[in-house]
Amino acid sequence: MFSSETKKALVVAIIADGIDFTFHYFLTHPMETLTYFVVKFLLAFFIASFLFGFVSYVKSKGWKNFGIGFVFALIFSTLMSVYYRAWELGEAQVPFGSRAPEIYGIARDNLVLFSGTWWLGHALFFVIGVFVANKIISAAKKKK
């Protein structure tokens, strides 16, 4: 019904969004909105779709399995950050950086640590999704 690339992208989006929801539920305040999670899901799906379509052109097995997923995770996290900051400034009309939820245990005044945690954390959620998607879909293909 769906191609393996589409299935993988769907798994990545579900996992990245699920981990992010869990992260926000337990480790941040206030909780993010439904719109935030819908946008994140769609962005993860489309970035992952592009990733799995692109990866077939990569020759190096090591780069294909490890490096390219991390590069696309950083792209995903960057685009999500751009969307979030644009929303802050445009729609919410709040000062830059003032809307991001607090992360328990990380001081907001340490801008490098605070921003870096957001950026790398969200990239990590995507990378986990990529690895799980590759394992699940590859295992399902082998069973056929």
Image (cartoon, rainbow, N blue to C red):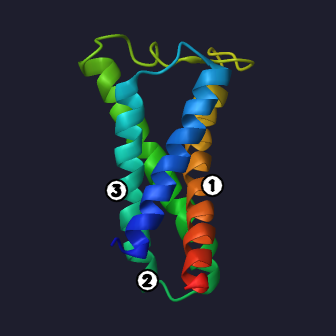
Q: Is residue 57 above or below residue 105?
A: below
Distance Cα–Cα, label 3 vs label 1: 16 Å
The residue pinned by badge 1 equals 128
Residue farthest toward the left in the current orientation of the protein: 90
**Residues under labels 2 and 1: Cα distance?**
20 Å
Q: Earlier in the sequence, mark 3 or mark 2?
A: 3
Position of the C terminus, as image quadrant, is bottom right
**Up-down: is 55 above or below 75?**
below
Quarter of the image for the N terminus: give it. bottom left
Residue type at the position of mark 3:
Phe
Name the amino acid type tagged 1: Ile
| Residue placed most toward the observer, 13 or 62 | 13
Task: Sort mark 2 into few (<14), some (14-19) or many (20+) by Cα contacts within 10 Å.
Answer: few
Q: Secondary structure at mark 3?
A: helix
Q: Which mark is residue 56?
A: 2
The residue beneath circle 3 is 46
Mark 3 to mark 2 CA distance (whole Å): 16 Å
Q: Position of residue 126 (x, y in %)?
A: 54, 51
